[in-house]
Amino acid sequence: MRHGVSSLGPIHSPELDELLRAPWFAQRLDTLAQKLDRRPADVREEAVGYLKEMAATHDQRATNAWRAFGRWFLRAYDVYVDDEQVQRLRELDRRSSLAFAFSHRSYLDGFVVPEVIAAKRLSPVYTLGGSNLNLFPFGQWASRSGVIFIRRNIRELPVYRLALRSYIAELVRSRGNLAWSIEGGRTRTGKLRPPTFGILRYLVDGLDEATRTDAGGIGTDIQVVGVSIVYDQLHEVPLMTREARGDGKRPEDLRWLVHLARQQRQRLGRAYLDFGEPIPLSDRLTELRADPATGAHEVERIALDVSHRINRATPVTATAVVSLALLGADRSLTLGQLLATVRPLAGYLARQGWAVAGALNLTDRATIRRTLDEMVVSGLVAVFDEGTEPVWQIAPGRHLVAAFYRNTIIHALVQRAITELALQAVAGSSAASGADAKTDTDTDTDTDVFAQARRLRDLLKFEFFFPDSTRYGAEVLSELRLLGADARDEGWRCDRDTAARLLAGADLLTAHLVLRPYLDAYLVVADRLAAEPCDPEPVDEPRLLGECLAVGQQWLLQHRITSAESVSLELFRTALRVAGKRELLLADADADRRQAFADEVAADVARADAIAELARRGQP
């Protein structure tokens, strides 16, 4: 099943041959032909053409050569993998198909995943990638090494969708392993993007089809494995940050590939690949389908499960921690000052159980100094060492790049940041202080930290991956206890003085670093939306996004927003999704409701400012 034969002509795929003989595939083609009102023979001919276009196999000689090419492409990094995680996957690999859904921060990811799987002696993997990367002469070589090139825009190609879905179903039925980026494209911000559902939907469909056609009664199952890939540093980040601000994406062609390969001549440290907890797809589908409320959204729920597990598997890198500390400083820092800033963060991450990449000690002076030296060499950090002791700061023009690295750990801090902002909402409220503010029956959000946290969860639900409501409340409760609150359950209330005291006594404040860039971007969108005239037509989103880019740049120059990171099409589009969910983009949308949205975000920005001032007072 997993090894084809070397050929200079069309690729010979046993799975493709089996699919073209399958009665269920012929039946699907006939049904689609009837739906499209076309001749069945024409639909089959079109489908066969698409299948030959995407066909892949595992030719041993081609695979060996492709692996060597991939290792050469990855020469800027040492790749770290947890062997205990691999051993657990080997056991699953003996009885199930493995579907690796990986995070996507770099073009290099497509080399890292198959290479690690091969090097660790797991069954070969079919990697799904965009046809934009099918470059001559490398495309044929890659296809013979298990790469399935698929088109990006297939909404208007029903025959192509059927061919792809059926090919994946046959691979599943043949117990093939698969890999694809669950984000669809590379993140431009550093944090995990919302998942795409297409490949996962086809995977579910393939499992259902394989189960129906399992004449031998062997049983088919798929273990969906989230894969986290992070790098100490990446050559691609400066270009990606420019794309996030509206620059056009450079087309992938041979010249682009040569440029990418040349960049890898400069060493950039380590790449870390970690596997999340596997999800038994059959069991999860059975669980979801038993509940009508979740069964209708089974693919979306599974995709979110995978994304949560990718985040949980993502380790904290020293580069990310140093970037966070320097971005939060209002001046250059000595090594001692930087360590004093990093230690509370390292302690918090350790208490919350977050792994550190390479098992480094983030409170170790030599570790932080070595990280600073690497960041200086790459141009990310500038050092002045002509005085009595060296001082470091983010290099001019590199703040967006540093923010990308900081965002690789933002998921580990977002709950803390939201809890801080919720406390600040109480601390700055007009509610009365004292016992009157803490009655058991009080439901005023001015004293309800949990209600404020849930409001922020709703505002930021398209930016971050949050657990369900019950678990979310438990996480807020945990953060309050870490901050010193005597909170036993969600019925806990506090007055202004208590909220202010908890924030003032915190050894770590993160809201201004973690949430302020997103809130600033949302404020630009909300402000422009509130300024829209009442119109019988829905909001012209492309026009509004262009206006947001211009106004965002103006506000940045006026220091009305704190970071160029906020002037981002990716963040503006997410803010528009929030506005859309609140029905603020519709024709004749209520002007007062649009203004209320702007006022809500402006209040949260002011709260983040207040926390930033508290953090500045406590700087070493």
Image (spheres, rainbow, N blue to C red):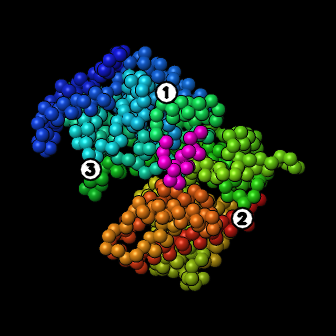
Screen quadrant of the C terminus = bottom right
Quadrant for residue 562, please give it.
bottom right
User: Magenta residues, as a range?
Assistant: 235-250
Distance from disc 2 to disc 1, alpha carbons, whole Å, reads: 45 Å
Q: Secondary structure at mark 3?
A: helix
In percent of width and height, residue 552 lies at 55, 64
Label 2 – label 3 distance at C-alpha: 51 Å
Marks 2 and 1 close (CB-CB < 8 Å): no
**Residue pointed to by mark 3:** 289
Up the image or down, 66 lies above or below 372; here it is above
The residue carrying mark 2 is: 616
Crowding at dot 3, Cα within 10 Å, few <14 / some 14-19 / many 20+, comes out as some
Q: Are marks 2 and 3 in contact (CB under 8 Å)?
A: no
What's under tag 1, amino acid-wise?
Answer: Glu
Can residue 480 be seen in this snapshot?
no
Could you tell whether 124 is left or right of 416 in the image? left
* Left or right side of 116 for 406: right
Disc 1 to disc 3: CB gap under 8 Å: no
2 or 1: tag closer to the N-terminus: 1
**Quarter-wise, where is residue 46 in the image?**
top left
Q: Residue at x 43, y 51 (%)?
A: 194
Q: Quadrant of residue 130?
A: top left
Q: Amino acid at mark 2?
A: Arg
Residue at the disc numbered 1:
115
Q: Position of residue 348 (x, y in %)?
A: 63, 54
